Image: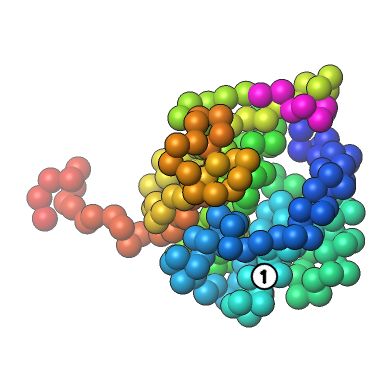
Amino acid sequence: MLQDDIFLHAEGDRWFARNRDALHGFDPSSDLPMRLMALYDLRPASVLEVGAANGARLACIHQSTGARTVAVEPSAEAIDEGKARYPSVIFVRATAGAVPLRESYDLVIVNFVLHWIDRATLLRSAAELDRLVRDGGFLIIGDFQPASRLRVPYHHLKDAGVYTYKQDYAALFRASGLYHPVALLTAHHATNQLDGAATENQRIGAWLLRKQFDDHYVSTGVNGFGA
C-alpha cells in the first residue's frame, strides 16, 4: 500500500488526534509560512493549502487578508472539526497526488506534507501542486531542510515500512526554471524558532517561490546567437 493511502485511510486521523491540542493553540507569529507571508506582505485573493489539518492556518489567513481559503486534507476527523470551527474555510478530502479541483490559486501552501508522500507518487504530487499555482502566483513549501537526503523510519508505524523522507523539496520546482526563489526561512524543529545553529537533523525550513511562465526568459536569436 502506498504511504499516501495509509495516511488517507488511517494515519491521517491518528496524526490529527495526536496533534489536536497543538493545532488549537496555533500561533501565526511562530509559523514559518505565516511569517513569510508577513515579511513579503502577501495578500492573495485565493489560497489553497494541501495537508491543511483542521484549517487553523487558513482561518488566520482569511481573517488577515479576506482571501478565499480552500483546505485539502486526508483526515476525515480533521475536516469534521475544521468545518465546525472555521466556517470561512472550504474543505476537500484528498491527498496531494490527486486533488479534485480545477482552478488555480494565488498562493498554494504545502507545509510538512511532502516528506510523507510515497516516492512512487512524489512527482505526481509535485505536478498537482504546480497545476494549482497560477502563473505569477506563489508556492510556500515547508519541510525538513537537511543538507543531504535522509530516510528515517516513521516511528508511529514502526513495522509498516513507512518512512519520513527529508530533502529540499523546493529543488523539484526550482529545477523547472518556472519557480524562482524569493526567500527561505529556517528554524529549529523542536522550538520552531529561527536558529542558525540548528543541525542537519534539527533544521526545518519554509521556501517562498514565485511561479512565472515566460517573463524571466531572455530572448535570443536562433540557437542563442545573434539578435
Q: Is residue 88 magenta?
A: no
Expressed as whole percent of the image width and height from the top left, the position of residue 33 reads: 56, 57
Q: Is residue 33 left or right of residue 147?
A: right
Q: Given the current orientation, which residue lies at the most extreme bottom position?
A: 66
Q: Is residue 15 above or below residue 218?
A: above
Expressed as whole percent of the image width and height from the top left, the position of residue 123 reads: 59, 38
Between residues 64 and 96, which one lies in front from this camera angle?
64
10 Å crowding of disc 1: few (<14), some (14-19), many (20+): some
Q: Is residue 51 left or right of residue 201?
A: right
Q: Is residue 121 above or below residue 152?
A: below
What residue sits 19% from the left and 43% below the top?
223
Q: Given the current orientation, which residue lies at the most extreme left position?
A: 226
What residue sits 56% from the left and 34% below the top?
202
Expressed as whole percent of the image width and height from the top left, the position of residue 28 reads: 62, 63
Question: Would you say residue 112 is visible in this rendering?
Answer: yes
Amino acid type, callout 1: Cys
Question: Would you say residue 176 is visible in this rendering?
Answer: no
Report the colour scheme: rainbow
Quarter assignment of residue 106: bottom right
Quarter of the image that includes the N terminus? top right
Q: Is residue 219 left or right of residue 170?
A: left
Pointer 1 residue: 60
Between residues 97 and 41, which one lies in front from this camera angle?
41
